[in-house]
Amino acid sequence: MRKKERQRLIRMLIETNDLERQEDFVEALNKQNVWVTQATVSRDIKEMQLVKVPSTSGGYRYSMPSQKNVDTQKKLVQSVHDSFVSISQMDKFIFMKVLPGSGPVISNLIDEMKYDDIFGTLGDDNTVFILCRGEEEAQKFQTTIDGMVKNS
């Protein structure tokens, strides 16, 4: 498994589990048929800038740094503002045209933000397809994008 895929899995695991030790990561990844060493997990933790926060059990667990979400939002707003061409909505689907090369970046940033209203995204060279959970959510997210275009 590639590092990027493994780190994506690690992000998912820390959102759904209280992982307190690096060995917990190794065990959780092994259950997903991803065989890693503690040293690999240690490098991933450092690169991903994971932090320990209080857990409900009284100990500490690993978590994503809170600042990263703010940085991702800022990057998303700037990327949309710099590369936006057009946007259209049909039912729960949003189709956004962007400058060439920007589609994958914007798609990834939207995914990283983990918006509750969004089921998933696809980004190619100059488009971003956004599947929302419903038509109302799509309208709401289109308004969010419009705000990014106008206010940054």
Image (cartoon, helix red, strand yellow):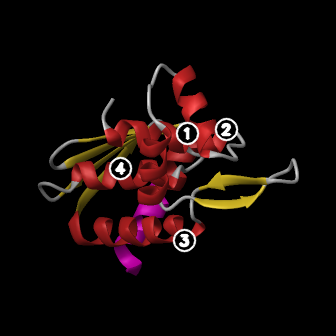
36 above or below 45? Answer: above
Dot 3 or dot 4, earlier in sequence = 3
Q: Identify which amino acid the numbered label 2 is placed on.
A: Thr
Q: Which residue is painted at 37% across and 80% down in the image?
A: 152
Which residue is under mark 3? 67
Mark 3 neighbour density, 10 Å: few (under 14) some (14–19) many (20 or more) = few
**In this view of the protein, which residue sits in the foreground, 64 or 142?**
64
Q: Identify which amino acid the numbered label 3 is placed on.
A: Gln
Dot 4 or dot 2, earlier in sequence = 2
Which residue is under mark 2? 16
22 above or below 146? Answer: above
Q: Identify which amino acid the numbered label 4 is placed on.
A: Asn
Dot 3 or dot 1, earlier in sequence = 1
Dot 3 or dot 2, earlier in sequence = 2
Find the distance from the CA under tag 3 to the CA under tag 1.
18 Å
User: Can residue 100 be seen by looking at this rendering?
Assistant: yes
113 above or below 6? Answer: below
Kindly check if marks 1 and 2 are in contact, taking CB atoms under 8 A apart as contact: yes
